Image (cartoon, helix red, strand yellow):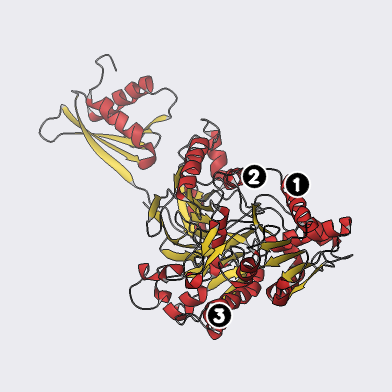
């Protein structure tokens, strides 16, 4: 039986370093190629030696697909393609292709230029890697090769995020990447066809969460920021340059306008100016409201939000600063956090998920003394708030997607084991399908029952209907008799007459013969007449003929009589029939073996 194999090299019972290998119909596909925010050693990138111990990855992979530009999904891409070695196609959407190199370069600067790490990809490697990228359009079926095809669907989450449907023959897999089933201020909700894949591979970051109303969270967020500003405090909002950042900027911008507030709002420079540029460029990927108002004003041109300079962090008085990255594991957000951590008037609002090992994760878990680089300790006195403005699907959203796609099996990645376990139980209970949650390096094998689609000729269907029997029902299989023609990779079931005509072939008759011995003292002609009379009385509703050439014919069955050379009372009956009348032929041979009733003249 055909089977699909799925092996996470990253994001198996873990958040971060998404990298999933799928083997389907003899093709090998890598889904995402991310880095782990919580590690600075070898564990930062996926272990590609799982694919091959030596040599380039090109020989082992048919293609790589990147779902979106977050570094935990694309951060290891230049390392994989340029340092390990991969020359095959890399697929991602247009916005991801535009934004990915900017984030990779920023990540490289922080790692190499500021931390001085050596075994790392260069700016040139990022450029060379991006040359291998083939951009995807939504809902466009792309033929990777003769057998492998992929199709992207809108995933919400961040600009350019896509879910992907992978198909080889009749087998298929859907990979969600990160997605959001509820629309927000700047993006729409994820959507997919009822494509019924063999496996749906879904993220499960918020596997046990059902989020409260968005409006309440927005109100809470604005209230906390406002209170902190009123008492003269500074508010730090660590964000990733794209996604939640734009969401919260739109929210604060409208609030500042409405309340006529004067405290400055800053955004760490560079990345975000480029980010907003891309939001304007790819306006079609945003939600309906932004697209409608775009003609009058661009939602991404902010009046109250200004570019941040690092010297502003020491300015007196209240301010709000959006700084990257979002988990406080490096960069400008961490620098500002260190400066402001000692003042209880200040506040840090964590708007999204934080991976274990990051400063963000530690302070959210109540740690108030942090060990920094060089054994220095940092006392955390500022207020720490967590407000989920996450763009991931919650438990309800994941269930909604299952209803939408109707998969035959489910596989969870990008989540914590305990939470996955809970959701796995819920999915199996509600949908009666198998749900898997492999750890990193563990392979899940799913056996598929490929259904082969066959076109049926209308004439054949009409003929079958005329024969009677039950009407076609998708839940009750029915046997059809016909000839299967395979032409240009498609199958068609037609009547044998039509098949001969279409293919220009002559019909060959296949006949079965059988000899039956019978004791009868009459002449051969009389015996044949007695057989004819007997069959007329037994077979009602059949056409039976006694021909002058000394044969009896029943449908396609021919019966002849001859006497045995040794004994004239022993008659040898020759029965011959075509394969269509096989059942009737077998019945007649059994009937005649029993002999003829004595009363027949």
Determine which of the numbered discs, if any, sits on residue 211 in the image.
2
| Residue linked to disc 1 | 215
> Residue 326: percent from the left, percent from the top?
62, 63
| Label 2, label 3: how far apart the Cα atoms are | 38 Å
Compared to residue 348, the image places residue 576 above or below, namely above
| Label 1, label 2: how far apart the Cα atoms are | 11 Å
**First in sequence: mark 3 vs mark 1:** 3
Label 1, residues with CA under 10 Å away: few <14, some 14-19, many ≥20: few
> Residue 574: percent from the left, percent from the top?
25, 36
Q: Can residue 141 be seen in this view?
A: yes
| Residue linked to disc 3 | 114
Q: Nearer the viewer, residue 464 or 105?
A: 105
Compared to residue 237, the image places residue 483 above or below, namely above
Find numbered disc 1 in the image and state the secondary structure of the residue it sits on: helix
Determine whether label 3 and label 1 are within 8 Å by CB.
Answer: no
Q: Residue at coordinates 86% horizontally, 63% vertically from top-left? A: 262
Label 2, residues with CA under 10 Å away: few <14, some 14-19, many ≥20: some
Q: Residue 539 is drawn in which quadrant?
A: top left
Image check: 407 left or right of 346? left
Image check: 411 left or right of 547? right
């Amino acid at each position: 039986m055909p089977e699909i194999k799925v092996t996470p090299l990253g994001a198996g019972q873990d958040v971060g370093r998404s990298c999933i290998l799928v083997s389907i119909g003899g093709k090998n596909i890598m889904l995402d190629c991310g880095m782990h925010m919580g590690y600075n050693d070898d564990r930062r990138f996926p272990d590609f030696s799982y694919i091959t111990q030596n040599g380039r990855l090109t020989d082992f992979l048919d293609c790589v697909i990147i779902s979106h530009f977050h570094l935990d999904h694309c951060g290891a891409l230049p390392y994989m393609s340029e340092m390990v070695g991969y020359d095959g196609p890399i697929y991602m959407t247009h916005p991801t292709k535009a934004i990915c190199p900017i984030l990779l370069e920023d990540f490289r600067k922080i790692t190499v230029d500021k931390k001085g790490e050596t075994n790392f990809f260069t700016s040139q490697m990022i450029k060379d890697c991006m040359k291998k990228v083939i951009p995807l359009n939504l809902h466009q079926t792309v033929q990777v090769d003769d057998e492998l095809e992929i199709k992207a669907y809108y995933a919400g989450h961040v600009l350019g995020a896509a879910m992907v449907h992978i198909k080889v023959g009749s087998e298929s897999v859907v990979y969600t990447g990160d997605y959001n089933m509820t629309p927000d201020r700047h993006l729409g909700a994820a959507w997919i066809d009822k494509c019924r894949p063999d496996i749906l591979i879904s993220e499960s970051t918020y596997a046990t969460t059902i989020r409260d109303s968005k409006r309440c969270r927005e109100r809470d967020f604005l209230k906390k920021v406002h209170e902190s500003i009123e008492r003269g405090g500074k508010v730090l909002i660590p964000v990733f340059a794209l996604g939640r950042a734009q969401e919260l900027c739109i929210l604060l911008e409208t609030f500042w306008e409405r309340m006529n507030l004067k405290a400055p709002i800053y955004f760490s420079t560079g990345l975000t100016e480029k980010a907003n540029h891309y939001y304007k460029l790819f306006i079609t990927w945003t939600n309906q409201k932004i697209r409608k108002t775009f003609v009058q004003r661009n939602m991404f041109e902010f009046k109250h939000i200004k570019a941040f300079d690092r010297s502003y962090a020491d300015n007196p008085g209240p301010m709000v600063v959006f700084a990257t990255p979002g988990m406080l594991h490096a960069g400008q957000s961490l620098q500002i956090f260190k400066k402001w951590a000692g003042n209880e008037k200040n506040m840090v609002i964590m708007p999204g998920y934080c991976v274990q090992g990051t400063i963000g994760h530690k302070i959210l878990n109540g740690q108030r003394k942090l060990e920094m680089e060089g054994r220095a300790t940092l006392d955390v006195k500022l207020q720490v708030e967590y407000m989920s403005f996450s763009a991931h699907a919650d438990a309800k959203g994941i269930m909604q997607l299952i209803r939408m796609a109707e998969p035959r099996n489910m596989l969870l990645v990008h989540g914590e084991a305990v939470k996955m376990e809970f959701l796995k139980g819920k999915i199996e209970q509600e949908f009666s399908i198998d749900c898997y949650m492999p750890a990193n390096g563990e392979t899940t094998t799913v056996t598929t029952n490929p259904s082969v689609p066959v076109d049926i000729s209308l004439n054949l269907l009409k003929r079958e209907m005329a024969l009677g029997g039950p009407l076609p029902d998708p839940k009750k299989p029915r046997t059809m008799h016909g000839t299967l023609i395979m032409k240009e990779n498609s199958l068609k079931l037609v009547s044998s007459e039509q098949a001969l005509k279409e293919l220009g072939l002559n019909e060959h008759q296949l006949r079965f013969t059988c000899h039956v011995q019978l004791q009868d003292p009459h002449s051969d002609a009389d015996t044949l007449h007695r057989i004819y009379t007997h069959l007329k009385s037994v077979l009602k509703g059949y056409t039976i003929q006694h021909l002058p050439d000394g044969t009896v014919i029943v449908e396609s069955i021919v019966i002849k009589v001859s006497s045995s050379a040794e004994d004239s009372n022993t008659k040898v009956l020759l029965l011959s029939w075509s394969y269509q009348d096989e059942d009737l032929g077998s019945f007649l041979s059994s009937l005649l073996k029993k002999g003829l009733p004595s009363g027949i003249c």
